[in-house]
Structure formats: C-alpha cells, structure tokens
Image (cartoon, rainbow, N blue to C red):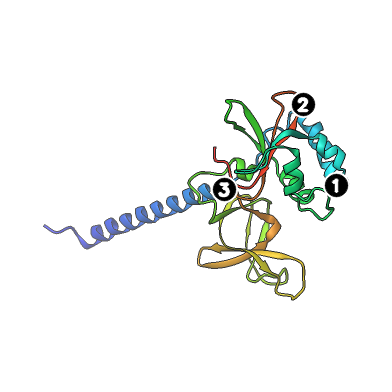
Amino acid sequence: MNPPAASRRQALLATLLGLALCIALAVTARAQDMRFAPSDEAASDGAWLNYKNRLLAALEAKNRKALLAAIDPDVDNGPEQKRGIEEFRRRWDFDDDRSPLWDELRKALLLGGAFVKDDKAGRRFCAPYVAAKWPTDFDPFRFGAIVAAEVLVKTEPSSESRTLATLGHELVAVEDWEVADRLAGFPQKWTRIRLRGGTGYVPEEQVRSPIEHMACFSAHNGPWRLVSFTAGYLPE
C-alpha cells in the first residue's frame, strides 16, 4: 500500500531539510578552514622583546652598525648562496638607503612569528607568522593571508569603489598580487582576490604571501641574532 500523500510530503521535507543542514555544515566547516589567526609566540620573552625593539629602532634609523650587531656572522642567505655578513650586505645593497631591506625586515618583525624546528634539532623564531605557520594543504603560490582585521574588499582597485565584503585574518585565493590603483599615478597598490561568485580588491599591504621573505632568529649560542632572511615558506 502506498503511503498517503501527506506522509510522502513530510518525508520529502525532512530529506530536504537534512540536505540543507549538511550543506550548511559543510560551508561552515570550510569557512573555519579559511581562518588564519595571527600568532606571536615570543611575545612573553623579555630578552626577545628587547632585541626586537633594538632591531626595529636600527631599521627605522638605518643604523648599519646596530643592524650588523644584530645579525649572526654565519647568517644564511638562501639556497646556493654564500653564508655570512659579506654576502648579506651584497644581496641587500646594504649601503644604499633605498635598499628594500629596511622595509622588508621591519614588516616581517611587526607581524609576529612562531617557533619552528631547525635542522640541528633546535628551534628558531621565524617572522612573519604567515610563513612560519602556513597550513600545508593550501598552495602557497595560489593563496595569501589577510593580515589585518576588518579589511574592506572593493569592487575595483580604488578606495572610492563599492565595498563587497569585510575580511579579517583568513586565507584567500589570489588572482593577481599587484594591481595599480584605478587613479593613474596614485601610489596605492591592490591585490585581486577571488570571492564566491566573483573577484574583489584589497590593499596590497593587508594581504601577504607565504613565499615572501621570512626572517628567522636564534638565541641558541648566546643573545638573539638574525640567522636567516630568505624567501620561501616553511611549513610546520
């Protein structure tokens, strides 16, 4: 005997509600997967904070003597590069006030960091956290991290355009890392990201790639020193 029409409708409604709940849970789980909270695991280390503040002051003043004192003599300059201060100076145009070193190292320090294991069974503190804590299931060449709270996503590369969404401390798919502002000659750069159903633009400085430069520091053999400042990401 076939069930009454009312019973069939109730069964269908229950099935549809169950399916909708499953979809909602899946979407919620995916949204949670995209969250990427900031981290600063050395924030309670007084010796580190003193070193960090001295280093930031040296970078701000372009104080080369103070900066050199903060670098390990055997500093790692990247794959297939010579180690040491001399190569560090050459690679970063150390004597040039326009060297990107002053700004790049400062930005890395200000974003906080995390402790990672080194190849000698010790550990280093690496900044920014974006590279040090990057989740291995996200392609570092296709995704970036929003590194601020309440970042406005714009319809066009212009602060005057309509706001599509507000993001904060999460991973985003990146389509173009550097897009010029809609106003010709305006210095602001934008990053085009992919949203559900389209694309949007966020200020370039508010999204960071895990393959940008990462600074690592160690106090294993004495006071804190910069032991590497190289491009690329370091998965946990």
Q: In which quadrant will I find the N terminus?
A: bottom left
Q: Which residue is mark 3?
A: 35
Quadrant position of residue 81: top right
The kind of residue tagged 3 is Arg
The kind of residue tagged 1 is Glu
Taking 195 as reference, is 235 above or below it?
A: above
Residue 129 seen by the camera: yes
Residue 174 point in image, percent of width and height: 57, 60
Q: Report the mark closest to the observer, 3 or 2.
A: 2
Q: Nearer the viewer, residue 207 or 21?
A: 207
Residue 128 seen by the camera: no
The kind of residue tagged 2 is Pro
Farthest residue to the bottom: give it: 184
Taking 75 as reference, is 21 above or below it?
A: below
Q: On the picture, is 58 further left or further right than 130?
A: right
State the residue at coordinates (72%, 68%): 159
| Dot label at residue 90 | none
Q: Nearer the viewer, residue 217 or 201?
A: 217
State the residue at coordinates (78%, 27%): 47
How much space separates mark 3 and mark 2, taking CA atoms?
35 Å
Q: Which residue is mark 2?
A: 223
How much space separates mark 1 and mark 3, taking CA atoms?
32 Å
Q: Nearer the viewer, residue 23 or 176?
A: 176
Q: Earlier in the sequence, mark 1 or mark 2?
A: 1
Mark 2, Cα crowd under 10 Å, few <14 / some 14-19 / many 20+, is: few
Q: Which residue is mark 1?
A: 60
Quadrant position of residue 16: bottom left
Residue 232 point in image, percent of width and height: 60, 47
| Disc 1 secondary structure class | helix
